Image: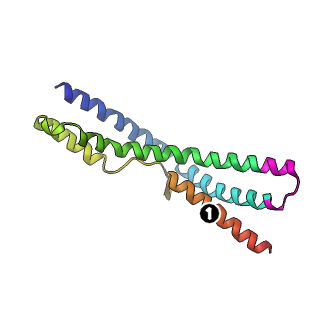
């Protein structure tokens, strides 16, 4: 009986996180999409402008701006990735517990939780998930735009 109570407490936290994740997706998905797309363009233009500068003062300001822009993109991507990682650990934790030696009802609850946790929680920005892979994609897109602008300039 104590194990069932503890298991129900453990189920409560992921359910709360799921509700919060759904709210975040509903409220911020379009904003995160626009932010990701515009950040790529801003990083591209800032990097392109860095090459044409010779004034050290303006150069340092643009470098600091670019760094802050990268951090601004990195933070939601990092925490989006953490949510995915932690939600996948639920199944691992349950598998390594001694749930097989519990009664039938307890095992059934564990199976339901395992089935539920097969689909990891994700923060999305409309058409893509917000995670570390997205951060790399945004940086690659910014570099690609930069390369095109540099080639056009020649």
Asked if residue 22 lies left or right of residue 33, the reply is left
* Residue for point 25% across, 48% down: 115
Q: Position of residue 41 (x, y in %)?
A: 68, 59
Q: Quadrant of residue 109?
A: top left
Query: In which quadrant will I find the N terminus?
Result: top left
Q: Nearer the viewer, residue 98 or 113?
A: 98
Q: Is residue 28 visible?
A: no
Label 1: element kind: helix
State whether residue 8 is above or below residue 131.
above
Asked if residue 93 lies left or right of residue 62, the reply is left
Q: Quadrant of residue 17?
A: top left
Return the residue at label 1: 141
Q: Which residue occupies the extreme top position in the image?
A: 2
Q: Is residue 71 visible?
A: yes
Q: Position of residue 107 (x, y in %)?
A: 16, 39
Q: Position of residue 100 (x, y in %)?
A: 15, 40
Magenta residues (range)? 51-62
* Residue for point 70% across, 68% down: 147
Which color scheme did the rendering employ for the protein? rainbow
Asked if residue 71 lies left or right of residue 97, the reply is right
* Residue for point 13% across, 36% down: 101
Q: Main secondary structure of the magenta part?
A: helix
- Local crowd size for mark 1, using a 10 Å CA cut-off: few (<14), some (14–19), many (≥20): some
Asked if residue 118 lies left or right of residue 123, the reply is left
Q: Is residue 150 magenta?
A: no
* Residue for point 61% across, 58% down: 139
Query: In which quadrant will I find the C terminus?
Result: bottom right
Q: Position of residue 108 (x, y in %)?
A: 16, 41
């Amino acid at each position: 009986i104590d194990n069932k109570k503890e298991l129900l407490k453990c189920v409560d936290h992921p359910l709360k996180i799921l509700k919060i994740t759904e709210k975040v997706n509903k409220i911020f998905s379009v904003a995160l999409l626009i932010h990701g797309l515009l950040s790529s363009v801003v990083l591209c233009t800032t990097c392109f402008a860095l090459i044409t500068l010779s004034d050290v003062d303006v150069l340092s300001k643009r470098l600091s701006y670019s760094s802050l822009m990268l951090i601004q993109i990195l933070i939601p991507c990092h925490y989006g990735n953490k949510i995915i990682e932690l939600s996948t650990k639920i199944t691992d934790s349950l598998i390594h517990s001694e749930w097989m030696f519990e009664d039938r009802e307890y095992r059934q609850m564990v199976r339901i939780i395992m089935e539920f946790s097969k689909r990891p929680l994700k923060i999305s920005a409309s058409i893509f998930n917000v995670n570390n892979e997205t951060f790399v994609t945004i940086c690659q897109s910014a570099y690609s735009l930069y390369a095109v602008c540099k080639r056009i300039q020649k």
